[in-house]
Amino acid sequence: MTFLWYIPNQVDPGHRGDDAVRGHNSLERLTELARLTEDHGWGGALLGTGWGRPDTFTVATALAAQTTTFQPLIAIRPGYWRPAHFASAASTLDQLTGGRVLVNIVSGQDNLAAYGDSEGDQPQRYARTKEFLQLVRRLWTEEDVTYEGEYFSVTGSTVATRPVVREGRLHPRLYFGGASDAAQRVAATEADVQLFWGEPLDGIAERISTLRQLEAELGREHAPLEFGLRITTLVRDTTEEAWADAEAKVAKMAEAHGSRDRRWFKAVGQQRLLDLAERGEVLDDNLYTAPGKYGGGGAGTTWLVGSADDVAKSLRKYQDLGITHFVLSDTPYREEIVRIGDQLLPLLTNGS
């Protein structure tokens, strides 16, 4: 299994309740977080992306240069990057770091006009993403590539610096998210890892079953799709302490944001999370849905809450469904890298 942390990569301090410390996004602070992941059992960290944030690839490069085993899961967007440009940049960094690059392809909404991109309807957006994935993979594994697509094309293209190849790895692993029909068809044929947000076990099981069916129907040409979970994990010494802290955090969110109708969200995956609150405030054993009512979004919409044993038990149930990649986090990020790394990860990696 792969265990990654999350580094928000934000201009403004205080992301999801993080400590609003001075220099929160300085190279010194980010390097400290990356080195803490190395020291406390994590394989690396997902770096957030979006217009209005520091450039994710630049941050990943800086952190890779300051660390020795840290794997940056670099979130990038087709349209912000051209595929040949990205393939060259990523394979260069991969070669320089001895094969530590991971890539998360993001096709969701962003301020596209600000960097000269445009957005069609959902099928068009994912059709472009599919071409991006196909072309990047070919550029990493072939020479003299000629490709003529609807959105991208290259002629006689060879990436000079090749990705690191080792057993079971031809190039950086391609993570991908999305719950719409169009997104799932792209994942089933072109991605290496499908990332899910924190849905209940039955929802994840249903998603995996659908993707396996699509792999067969659409004729996947790569190794079988792998699955990952991106979720907030609130861990304390005891179950009671964890729930007290979780409820106190949500109360503070409610005071700051108030309950809001968030049905305007267009992303299918995000809406699936928000709809969970209608099923109950706590699902399965300890999946807390209340944060989504008061401003929690994405991986902050639902939390797994409890002692290290409680949360490990829940994560093992996801593992039993076929999840092998976990991207976990909680705030304050610095303290929780250590706490969750020291208390939770040994229960999962040692098989206890």
Image (cartoon, grey):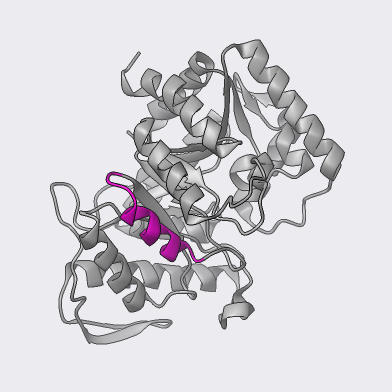
* Residue 56 drawn in magenta: yes
Vertical side of 237 occupied by 176: above or below: below
Left or right, 131 with reference to 119: left
Left or right, 319 with reference to 125: left
Vertical side of 201 occupied by 65: above or below: below
* Residue 2 drawn in magenta: no
For image coordinates 75% across by 45% down, the residue present is 295
Residue 76 in the image, given as x and y percentages of width and height = 46, 64
Residue 336 in the image, given as x and y percentages of width and height = 53, 31
Quarter of the image where one finds residue 341: top left
Residue 185 in the image, given as x and y percentages of width and height = 44, 58
For image coordinates 31% across by 65% down, the residue present is 90
What is the magenta range? 55-69
Q: Main secondary structure of the magenta part?
A: helix
Q: Nearer the viewer, residue 11 or 126?
A: 11
Of all residues, the one furthest to the bottom in this rendering is 155
In the rendered image, which quarter contains the N terminus?
A: top left
Q: Which of 20 and 267 is in front in this view?
A: 20
For image coordinates 46% across by 71% down, the residue present is 78
Q: Please say whether residue 175 is visible from this viewpoint.
A: no
In the rendered image, which quarter contains the C terminus?
A: top left
For image coordinates 45% across by 23% down, the residue present is 317
Vertical side of 230 occupied by 214: above or below: below
Q: Nearer the viewer, residue 208 or 216?
A: 208
Q: Tag count in the figure?
A: 0
Q: Please say whether residue 42 is visible from this viewpoint.
A: yes
Residue 333 in the image, given as x and y percentages of width and height = 55, 38
Left or right, 144 with reference to 103: left
